[in-house]
Amino acid sequence: MLASRVFARGFASSAFQRGAKVAVLGAAGGIGQPLSLLLKLNPNVDRLALYDIVNTPGVAADISHINTKSHVTGHVGQEQLGEALKDAQVIVIPAGVPRKPGMTRDDLFNTNAGIVKTLAEAAAKHAPKAHLLIIANPVNSTVPIVAEVFKKHGVFDPKRLFGVTTLDVVRASTFVGQTKKTEPENINVHVIGGHSGVTIMPLLSQTGIKFSQEEIDALTNRIQFGGDEVVKAKNGTGSATLSMAQAGARFTDSLLRALSGEKGIVEPTYVKSHVAEKDGVEYFATKVELGTEGVKKIHDIGPINDYEKKLYQAAIPELKKNIAKGVEFVKKN
Ligand code: NAD
Ligand code: LMR
């Protein structure tokens, strides 16, 4: 049952216009609910479609009472997925299980790969031109899964597929701010690579801030394993949801503003990239300038010191393995 109905607003069929339809897949979950709430508050969202396999009528009814302009619809179960996706410019995917203490993100692969593949197949069919924002872990593998599904359907455009790594950047600002006793909002840390353990590489040398070696070791480790702090503190009930919702809402907002023509918007994100291609890595996060078509310009890594070169060497084999696992999964299934 739909919780409320979509009111079409006459979108131009090709060009993106301010006031987008955004679909959240996994909208009833720990991330999905606060993310949907934040998107309901975003003036650049015109229609908000909330999809999950459970509970979305209630979540949609609740959020729809907020007096912002967007129209909210709830869609539950596979048979309502097509309607949720139809005409979406942006699809955000937090659907999937979270970690428990002792697990790596890769341990989620067996469950989440299938979920993401199913959702990607529906997106390729019902909204092949949408921009896909992948939150579901392991991001290093789920992004290649979506790419392979879209390739199979002949609709893959690398400019429209993003692994959301914003939380790593948000955490990096916070942790550096705490260490240096400065406002975290003013600190910008370029975090590159992927989204798990050693593949998360903060480039502290590019901040222009002076750190002792002890600070660099501690901060690098904390940024790489920040997710584990939350998993441990939640003690078996899940992983980061509220900070992830904020990070996901920030990335979605940046993309929506860029799609509508705002210039100079740059966010680090995990995309199909030339940056580490020479080392056999097809997907990589660096700063990406967003534009009216999605990815506009992928920035290079920039200058890095010997310490960061070692981080890079450690990340490459892991990233390669994670990416190959995603690609293989779609080939075999
Ligand atoms: P959760 O269990 O609270 O919510 C997941 C939701 O997905 C549930 O509502 C569930 O019903 C739904 N779901 C399951 N299968 C589905 C399907 N086939 N179609 C649609 N919905 C489906 O989990 P959570 O805490 O919200 O985390 C979700 C995912 O996000 C996890 O994989 C987690 O590891 C990941 N995550 C990523 C980042 C990041 O930085 N990219 C940060 C935090 C969490
Ligand atoms: C995070 O970084 O918080 C997420 O990827 C969730 C996790 O498993 O740590």
Image (cartoon, rainbow, N blue to C red):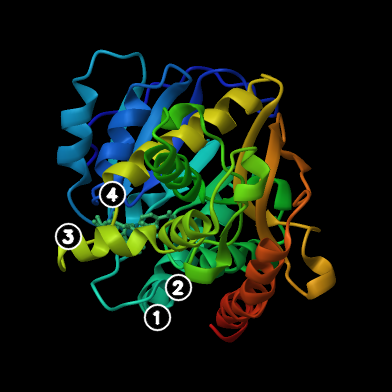
Whole-number angstrom distance, CA of label 1 to CA of label 3: 22 Å
Asked whether mark 4 and ligand 1 are closer than 8 Å, the reply comes as: yes
The residue mark sitting in front, 3 or 2, is 3
Look at 40% across and 21% down and name the residue there. Answer: 42
Whole-number angstrom distance, CA of label 3 to CA of label 2: 24 Å
**Given the image, on which type of amino acid does mark 4 rest?**
Thr
- Residue 147 vertical placement versus 259 (above, below): below
Q: Secondary structure at mark 2?
A: helix
Label 3 crowd bin: few (<14), some (14–19), many (20+), radius 10 Å = some
Residue closest to the far right: 278
The residue mark sitting in front, 4 or 1, is 4
Is 167 positioned to the left or the right of 233 in the image?
right
Whole-number angstrom distance, CA of label 2 to CA of label 1: 6 Å
Q: Secondary structure at mark 1?
A: helix
- Count of residue discs: 4
Give the residue at mark 3.
234
**Given the image, on which type of amino acid does mark 2 rest?**
Ala
Q: Nearer the viewer, residue 96 or 286?
A: 286
Asked whether mark 1 and ligand 1 are closer than 8 Å, the reply comes as: no
Q: Position of residue 259 (x, y in %)?
A: 64, 27
The residue mark sitting in front, 4 or 3, is 3
Q: Residue 113: which disc?
A: 2
Give the residue at mark 1.
110
- Residue 82 vertical placement versus 252 (above, below): below
Asked whether disc 2 touches disc 1, contact meaning CB atoms under 8 Å apart, the reply is yes
Asked whether mark 3 and ligand 1 are closer than 8 Å, the reply comes as: no
Whole-number angstrom distance, CA of label 2 to CA of label 4: 20 Å
